[in-house]
């Protein structure tokens, strides 16, 4: 009654908005539909081919052969250790990047996440230059402590952690940024030191983000090939992980390679299922 | 330690602070002095710097200058975790992963109590605040009023010498608010140390606090008991808050000349700079110039806006003298009030109140 002049334009806006919104939903233009369907096929057909060619009869025998079992066991142990290493140093690093404003923070973040886009083989070469027997750090490790990392199981863990940790750091840092820093302030007013606040408040609050980051890092470590073969070599039982075994088997025993691939595919699907709440929420 | 003890004469007990915070274009400079057992409300519009003052008291925002003494001890550079200060945050910030009991036990635990001891203390606090039945509940299972009391228990469990409350009732719906306000008033009255609360709601401030400190643009513009402030507002903001029309001018006998506006006639005889205040209900509106009216204050105005206040209508008037007038719905209809309408406003001198600046 008081402001009748204000109403009609708003009502007209609602009426206009209705049909316009509906038009967007119907009819996908062909120039978009065709490439999109090609994309779907491109990504799915190889996986289907893998399933079609799987020697289902000999599969149990393949998977229980000592060689496969050895590679699988080594892969699981190394990926888990690499994830553990990433957690121990990656979570504090993510906290530092998210919560402490220090000069050069942007540069540090860029450098830390570089392994995400770096070809893994280059990572392996870089690790050799750093931690190899003649590397700038490895030299001292060797002469002072008698520690040699390249071409050992520890070397596999290091190569995998190098490649996988950035996934964890990025994931945890994102979660930390999204978490309300005022909870830490509330903890401080209750007498908690910054470390206590992190341990008793922040860590439990970001636990889901850490778990997601850890799963992501673990999956990345499990599939690691380039950096591992460059830095740790390909010794069965010591440094030959599943991806390396798959590559090797493909040349001598394709059926074994398919069986091994199937295991890795199953693991990937399990990881995706585990993270679906985090990634597929948009759908 | 002994030195502090010697210095702790009764006169230095409580809070004595000058909070100066410079933050890119905004400067807060507020002086606060609060005795133990007193509840002071920082009242002011949004963006006045109330919350900044509260954060500075808690140590969450560093001071650019000034001092902060609590019971004779300088705390200006002490980190928040080492200050004997408890905070009830606006949205409580209860730790969502901990039960009500563990939220309250968090403080005692940080102060070195064993887990069992801290939980026993927490249970006692929750019991005292009438939450004994909710000790095991996670914050998301608590109602607004319950969460507010858990937050209060959590702050009190550290036995603070300074209790800070940031908009303690803002997160509650109107009905819960009434009930929580009464409870909070009781708990604050029992609290033996200094309590400072921040609010933009004058009713909360008047019900909860013994004394109001009004902050505008980072400065204290007025302080005193709620009654004194309501009687003698010194800024437009406070006048609107307590529902008064307020003008500033030069008094000469019964007449007060405004800097830009008509003269006002008052009952008080004063001279020099004064404030003149009258409630919107003291204004009478007429469609035509009243001939027989005894009112000395008569102005021609234009209706700028109308707003419903309960069963009253508040008319926002511009013209010779900008003012707010309250009238009944019936009267408004009879006058045919609408934005842009021309009216005559009268105020009897007896209903104005003038006081020196």
Image (spheres, rainbow, N blue to C red):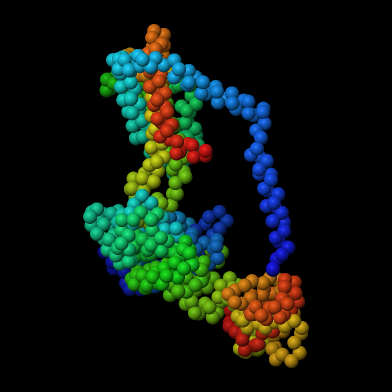
Q: Residue furthest top?
A: A252
Who's the residue at 34% across and 72% down the image? B190
Does residue A83 show up?
Answer: yes
Residue B277: give x, y in percent of width and height. Answer: 61, 80
Q: Nearer the viewer, residue A280 or B15?
A: A280
Q: Nearer the viewer, residue A83 or B54?
A: A83
State which quadrant residue B304 falls in: bottom right
Q: Nearer the viewer, residue A118 or A247?
A: A247
Residue A56, placed above or below residue A201: above
Residue A61: give x, y in percent of width and height. Answer: 31, 15
Q: Nearer the viewer, residue B11 or A63?
A: A63
Who's the residue at 64% across and 75% down the image? B314
Who's the residue at 69% across and 44% down the image? A20
Task: Please indicate whether residue B166 sits to the left or right of residue B263 in the image.
Answer: left
State which quadrant residue A153 falls in: top left
Residue B133, placed above or below residue B340: above
Residue A79: give x, y in percent of width and height. Answer: 35, 26
Does residue B77 show up?
Answer: no
């Amino acid at each position: 009654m008081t402001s009748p002049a204000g109403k009609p334009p708003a009502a007209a806006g609602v009426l206009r908005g209705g049909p316009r919104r509906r038009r967007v939903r119907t009819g996908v233009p062909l120039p978009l539909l065709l490439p999109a369907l090609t994309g779907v096929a491109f990504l799915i057909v190889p996986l289907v081919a893998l399933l079609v060619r799987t020697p289902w009869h000999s599969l149990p025998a393949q998977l229980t052969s000592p060689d496969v079992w050895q590679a699988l066991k080594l892969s699981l142990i190394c990926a888990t250790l690499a994830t553990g290493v990433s957690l121990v140093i990656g979570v504090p690093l993510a906290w530092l990047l998210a919560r402490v404003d220090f000069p050069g923070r942007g540069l540090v973040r860029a450098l830390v996440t570089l392994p995400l886009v770096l070809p893994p083989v280059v990572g392996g070469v870089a690790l050799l230059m750093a931690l190899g027997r003649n590397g700038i750090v490895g030299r001292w490790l060797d002469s002072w402590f008698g520690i040699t990392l390249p071409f050992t199981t520890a070397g596999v863990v290091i190569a995998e952690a190098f490649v996988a940790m950035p996934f964890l750091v990025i994931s945890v840092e994102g979660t930390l940024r999204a978490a309300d820093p005022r909870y830490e302030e509330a903890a401080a007013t209750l007498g908690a030191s910054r470390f206590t606040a992190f341990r008793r408040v922040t860590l439990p609050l970001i636990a889901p983000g850490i778990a997601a980051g850890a799963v992501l890092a673990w999956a990345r470590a499990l599939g690691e090939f380039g950096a591992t073969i460059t830095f740790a070599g390909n010794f069965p039982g010591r440094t030959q992980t599943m991806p390396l075994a798959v590559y090797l088997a493909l040349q001598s025993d394709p059926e074994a390679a398919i069986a091994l691939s199937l295991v890795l595919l199953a693991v990937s699907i399990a990881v995706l299922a585990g993270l679906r709440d985090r990634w597929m929420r948009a759908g | 330690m002994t030195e502090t003890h010697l210095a702790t004469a009764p006169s230095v007990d409580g809070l004595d602070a000058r909070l100066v915070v410079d933050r890119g274009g905004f400067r807060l400079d507020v002086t606060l002095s609060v005795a133990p057992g007193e509840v002071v409300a920082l009242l002011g519009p949004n963006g006045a710097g109330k919350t900044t003052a509260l954060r500075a008291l808690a140590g969450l925002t560093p001071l650019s200058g000034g001092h902060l003494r609590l019971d004779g001890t300088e705390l200006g550079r002490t980190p928040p975790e080492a200050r004997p200060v408890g905070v009830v945050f606006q949205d409580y910030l209860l730790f969502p992963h901990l039960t009500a009991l563990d939220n309250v036990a968090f403080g005692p635990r940080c102060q070195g109590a064993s887990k069992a001891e801290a939980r026993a203390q927490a249970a006692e606090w929750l019991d005292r605040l009438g939450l004994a039945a909710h000790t095991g509940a996670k914050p998301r299972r608590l109602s607004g009023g319950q969460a507010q009391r858990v937050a209060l228990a959590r702050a009190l469990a550290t036995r603070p010498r300074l209790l800070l409350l940031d908009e303690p009732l803002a997160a509650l719906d109107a009905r819960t608010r009434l009930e929580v306000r009464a409870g909070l008033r009781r708990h604050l009255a029992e609290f033996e140390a200094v309590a400072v609360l921040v609010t933009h709601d004058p009713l909360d401030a008047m019900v909860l606090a013994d004394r109001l400190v009004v902050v505008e643009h980072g400065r204290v513009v007025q302080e005193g008991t709620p009654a004194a402030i309501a009687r003698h507002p010194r800024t437009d903001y406070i006048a609107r808050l307590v529902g008064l029309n307020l003008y500033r001018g030069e008094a000469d006998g019964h007449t007060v000349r405004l800097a830009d506006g008509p003269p006002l006639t008052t009952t008080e005889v004063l001279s020099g700079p004064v404030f003149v205040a009258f409630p919107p209900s003291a204004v009478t509106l007429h469609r035509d110039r009243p001939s027989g009216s005894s009112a000395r204050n008569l102005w021609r105005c234009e209706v700028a806006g109308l707003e419903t206040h309960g069963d009253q209508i508040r008319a926002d008037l511009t013209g010779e003298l900008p003012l707010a007038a309250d009238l009944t719905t019936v009267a408004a209809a009879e006058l045919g009030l609408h934005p842009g309408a021309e009216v005559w406003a009268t105020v009897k001198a007896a209903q104005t109140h003038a006081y020196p600046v």
